[in-house]
Amino acid sequence: MTLKIPAPAAPEIVQKLIDIVGENNVSVSPVKRLLNSRDMFPVSLMHHAEGVVEYFADVVVWPENAEHVAEVVKLAKSIRMPVIPFGAGSGVCGGVLPIHGGISLDLKKMNGILDVSAENMTVVAESGIMGQTFEMELNRRGYTLGHFPSSIYCSTLGGWAAARSAGQLSSKYGKIEDIVMGLEFVSPSGDITQISPVPGYDSGPDWKQVLIGSEGTLGVITKVTCRIHPNPESRRFVGFNFPDAPSGTQAMRLIMQHGLRPASMRLYDELDTMLVGSKGAEESAGVGLADFLPVTQIETRLRTIAPGFFNKAQRFVARWSEVANLLEKFSKDGCLLILMFEGQEAIAEYEYETAVRLCEKLGGKNCGPDPALKWFKNRYHVSYKMSKVFYNGAFVDTIEVASTWKKLIPLFEEIRDAIRPRAFLMAHFSHSYDDGCSIYFTFLSSAKNSIEAEKAHRKIWRLAMEATLRVGGTISHHHGIGLSKAEYMVEQHGDLMNIFRAVKDAGDPDNIMNPGKMGL
């Protein structure tokens, strides 16, 4: 199949961009335009697998400083050309897709660490720095950011802020909006604006929090000031088996409400626990289905637990989701809870011992450190296994929602009941707070072609979002909105979307900043 490539930006526009950032920082190459016209949005991946690319940037630009960004935005405003800020393209919601063409503003050359303050315990860095590079440079200086998303090897600081990301250790260090103290950004008019990094704020609206999570619709984040912490002296690991999700989440709630702050606390539902095993089975990242392998592991479990079902199995779990989902009824492993504590040795030890006593008092079975150690060792692997699914004609996606503790199990059950007739589904609970928690669902399904797959994918999402809104949860916890959840923004926010639109219209009347995203 021949890929249809639309014409690039006009030569005169390209020349003006070259005048701003230099010839080596502008490209209309079809390959570079293609690479910056996609992220990990599953619908796009389905189409790409069949050689169909729906959206193409007109030109890719690599600014080297905020002044470059400002001049590019001013030019784009003058000719009413869209600007799509681009970090590393690891998002899963279509947030960087150039649905109206335009300039893909790739920020990866803005990757410097500008200041590290031991007195303030802060770091100032440019928004294009890659996550793992950022963390390693901080570690070398004796610090940690404490922010470890699964995409840390292929995502940027600016992307984290733009999408309100959460790292795997958020229960201790917070989400990115808790870590960011200040911002530099370029407005849609091309002005460079500073939001000072201050520890408290009481002078009107907190514009930092308005910009964090705005996904490039209100401007371009160019510099970020973050809180940092000393490298941890000590880590402690432990796993527990609980009979079911309600008892496991009760332990999570009480751990948080007793003032303990595990760096990581993750509870896997029965199916996830059964497939990965909690007693020494080698697993990829403690997420079961997300290993995305052919049925070797599941075949073993089927033959052991439910041999009568095995003759219905196909190559991928997606082909027999109804059967696979029934496996949960045969599970005797319960739900696996893994805990990790880190920090100063005395504090980590105290939190560990207190949590162990609490879990044992609540009826949890102590599995020792191995389950949590295995998760920690393999915690990034899942992000690099998805391609096997799409290659084999299936599709996979994740749904991360959140609610208060009181609504958490009803939310879990509503979404599970809605999706399971249509897809293989499993979940884990993570990113805990005193008052609630996130649920991270992974689903796998298939269809005969990308058109049918997209319909199936949209139906699954609609069912999940309707269930979330019905129960009273949030439609996204840390993946952002982009295109995938845009249609649910009004249902989530009601009349408050009018305020969001008013801010957008006032600051960006020509709608050049990442148009079409977040329901705008």
Image (cartoon, grey):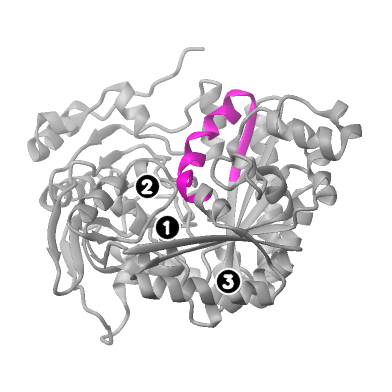
- Work out whether residue 228 or residue 109 is closer to the camera in this orientation and state it: 228
Contact between marks 2 and 3 (CB within 8 A): the answer is no
Q: Sort mark 2 into few (<14), some (14-19) or many (20+) by Cα contacts within 10 Å.
A: many
Q: Choose top left, top right, bottom left or bottom right for residue 230.
A: bottom left
| Residue at the extreme top of the image, as rendered | 1
Q: Would you say 236 lies left or right of 122 here? A: right
In the rendered image, which residue does mark 2 sit on? 152
Per the image, label 1 sits on a secondary structure element best described as loop
Q: Residue furthest right?
A: 308
Please tell me which of labels 2 and 3 falls first in the chain. Answer: 2
Q: Residue 20 carries which label?
A: none
**Quick check: can you spot residue 286?**
yes
User: How far apart are the alpha carbons under marks 3 and 1?
Assistant: 24 Å
The magenta region covers 375-397
Q: Quick check: 508 left or right of 70?
A: right
* Residue depth check, mark 3 versus mark 1: number of the one nearer the observer: 3
Of 36 and 143, nearer the camera is: 143
| Kind of residue indicated by mark 3 | Val
**Image quarter of the C terminus:** bottom left
Pointers 2 and 1 in contact (C-beta within 8 Å): yes
- Where does label 1 land, which residue? 167
Alpha carbons under labels 2 and 1: distance apart: 9 Å
Q: What element carries label 2?
A: helix
Q: Specify whether residue 385 is painted magenta.
A: yes
Mark 3 sits on what residue?
356
The earlier-in-sequence mark between 2 and 1 is 2
Q: In the rendered view, does 22 fall on the left or right side of 33?
A: left
Location of residue 161 in the rendering, given as x and y in whole percent from the top left corner = 34, 59
Residue 217 locus on image (x, y percent): 36, 56
Residue occupying image coordinates x 49% and y 55%:
481
Q: Tell which of 461 and 297 is nearer to you.
A: 297
